[in-house]
Image: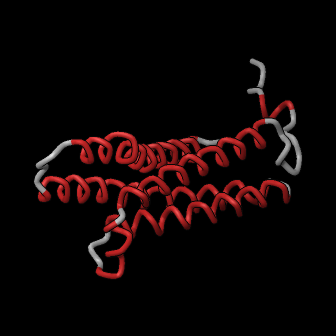
Amino acid sequence: MNWVDTAVKWVHLISIVTGVGLTLFQYLVLFPVLKRVQGVPEELVKALQRRAGMIIGISWIFIWVTGIYNIVVIVPDVKPNYHMMLGAKLLLVLVLFFISTALSHPSLAFEGIQRNRAKWVALAAWLGIAVLVVSATMNMMRLKGVALKELPTQTQVLPPAP
């Protein structure tokens, strides 16, 4: 793995942590507090949601770009069992992307979802956790060699001796 692949992996990981982390923050902290505290100005709630939505949206851009790069680099070297996991992950990601977009986009088409924001954020949080679990499983499959078409040779793993 060269430095570009490593940098792309880190940007992908940081973007996922940011998007899922903000969703978990909303689910575990923000909405429970807003539910208990009386008299919170609606303008403040909307400003918080708008800001979180912008950051999650930017995270999604990085997730898609780096994810596509990772697919192009990794998929040619893996077995069909990895492709099945990738398909499941992409399906979860598409649903999560739709919910994230619907929660933060100011379209009237998403008004019903936004009215029940706490429930949809909860679903997005659990989907985010599921994506992380599937991703970690896929990484372990590659690290253990279970998903690779051929295992790296000793010379590919270790640098040459001086």
Answer with left or right where residue 107 lies relative to residue 82: left
Name the residue nearer the viewer: 64 or 8: 64
- Say which quarter of the image contains residue 105: bottom left
**Above or below: residue 18 compared with residue 71:** above
Give coordinates of residue 39: x percent, y percent: 11, 49
Q: Is 89 placed above or below 7 here?
A: below
Is 133 left, or right, of 53 in this rendering?
right
Horizontal and vertical percent for residue 30?
Answer: 29, 44
Residue under the image location 64 percent in, 47 percent down? 135
Give the x, y percent position of residue 114.
33, 67
Q: Residue at x 76, y 37 (%)?
A: 143
What number of labels is visible? 0
* Quadrant housing residue 32: top left
Residue at the spot 85% in from the left edge and 43% down from the top edge:
146
Q: Is residue 10 left or right of residue 74?
A: left
Seen as rendered, the residue at the extreme top is 162
- The colour scheme of the drawn protein is secondary structure
Quarter in which the C terminus is drawn: top right
Residue at image position (87%, 51%) is: 149
Q: State the residue in front, 134 or 144.
A: 134
Residue 80 position in % (x across, y down): 85, 59
**147 sits left or right of 27 in the view:** right
Looking at the figure, which quarter contains the N terminus? top right
| Nearest the eye: 39 or 18 | 39
